[in-house]
Amino acid sequence: MAAMFAAGVATFVLLYATQALLPELHTTFGVSPTQTTLSMSLTTAGLAVGLLVAGPVSEAVGRTPLIVGSIWLATLIACLCPLAWSWPVLLGLRLVEGVALAGLPAVATAYLREELHPKALAGATGLYIGGNALGGMASRLVTAPVADLAGWRWAMAVAALLALTCAVAVTLSLPRSRNFVPGPRARTSRREMTRVALTDPALRSLYLMGACSVGTLVAVFNALGFRLTGGPHHLSLATISLLYLVYPLGTLSSSWSGSLADRYGRRAVLPAGCTLAVGGVLLTLLSPLVAIVAGLACLTAGFFVMHGLASSWVAVRAHLAGASSSQAAAFYLCSYYVGSSVFGSLGATAWSAGGWGGVCLLSLALLACSALATARLRRIPNLATQ
């Protein structure tokens, strides 16, 4: 669990290394706000594509070799990003970095399901998702002040150093799989497992929830820097980065909701996360900075409740339905990162077109879709206790 927590930190450190730097990239390269989000959306798009390959590959090579290899390859590419001499080169490196990173999240929940007792799974997955939250916070808190002092190149170098530290920790501490069983080699078996992973109604609802919930979070945070660097707040990047201190609430909420789900079931806890996220978006409509911070805190906590529960639920549901857990996790995360890529860029477009009101309108529409998926999950019969 400690190793997977470090892996979760590395994932979000690398994935969101440029989010706090979007205003800086806008000024340095002379690109539009929507174009700056490509430095994130291309990474998440590459990750989404890579997930479709990494899941099946893990069934042949095993979980731990793919996790360790993925984190090291992604970290090495991240070390090249500060050396990019043009905007297209930076985008190309970020795209390849996303593809390299795919092996880690593709098998994380499947690895936990295989190695831990079922009653501990939701809590352990919550801790892994909490590592994601901490990595996202650490990335933004470090990169923005460094960018203010020394520019975006040094900021991205520091993010790569953080990921390198996590890679060493994962390599030294991650136990080898003890309960991994290679997936079926027969083409008909693989085809049937893929069909189940794509047609099971609960899994499809979870895929939709992942895409829409993360799309909300990324859209809000992508537009946040542009809102707060302008009037009436006129904050620096370093000051704005302090708002990412709300991310430990994601660590707490994912771990806490996982424990509650182990006791009361995911269906009972999931709606609370969606409700909390909606309240957070509405709070950000207010002008005082304290209200914006409170809204971001509620949105972050609510999102990680939904994501943490959905992640562990996908692995369990797939196993019970007769699908590959790693393949279903790959489909979930593919939807998740496509949502991050597409809706994150739409957040910047909504900001350019309609200001913060446009961003909130987009976010509430996405959360409405998440709420519909939650309601549908409550009506789908259990395959076992979930």
Image (cartoon, grey):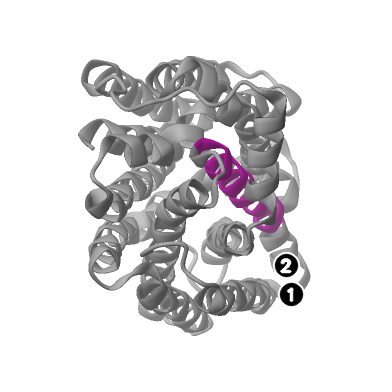
Residue 330 in magenta? Answer: yes
The residue drawn where x is 57% and y is 63% is 202
Q: Which residue is mark 1?
A: 354
In the image: residue 341, left or right of residue 222: right
Q: Give the x, y percent position of residue 212.
A: 61, 63
Seen from the viewer's position, the closer of residues 79 and 352 is: 79
In the image: residue 125, left or right of residue 373: left
Inspect this view and state whether residue 384 appears.
yes
Q: Give the x, y percent position of residue 58.
A: 51, 23
Residue 53 against residue 34 in the figure, above or below: above
Say the numbered circle drawn on residue 29.
none
Q: Give the x, y percent position of residue 198.
A: 68, 50
Q: Give the x, y percent position of residue 91.
A: 69, 29
Residue 18 occupies which quadrant of the picture?
A: top right
In the image: residue 268, left or right of residue 209: left
Structural crowding at the residue carrying mark 2, measured as other residues with C-alpha within 10 Å and reported as few (<14), some (14–19) or many (≥20): many
In what element is the residue under mark 2?
helix
The residue drawn where x is 40% and y is 62% is 384
What's drawn in magenta, residue-wise? 326-345
SS assignment for the magenta stretch, majority? helix
Mark 1 touching mark 2, by CB under 8 A? yes
Say the numbered circle drawn on residue 350.
2
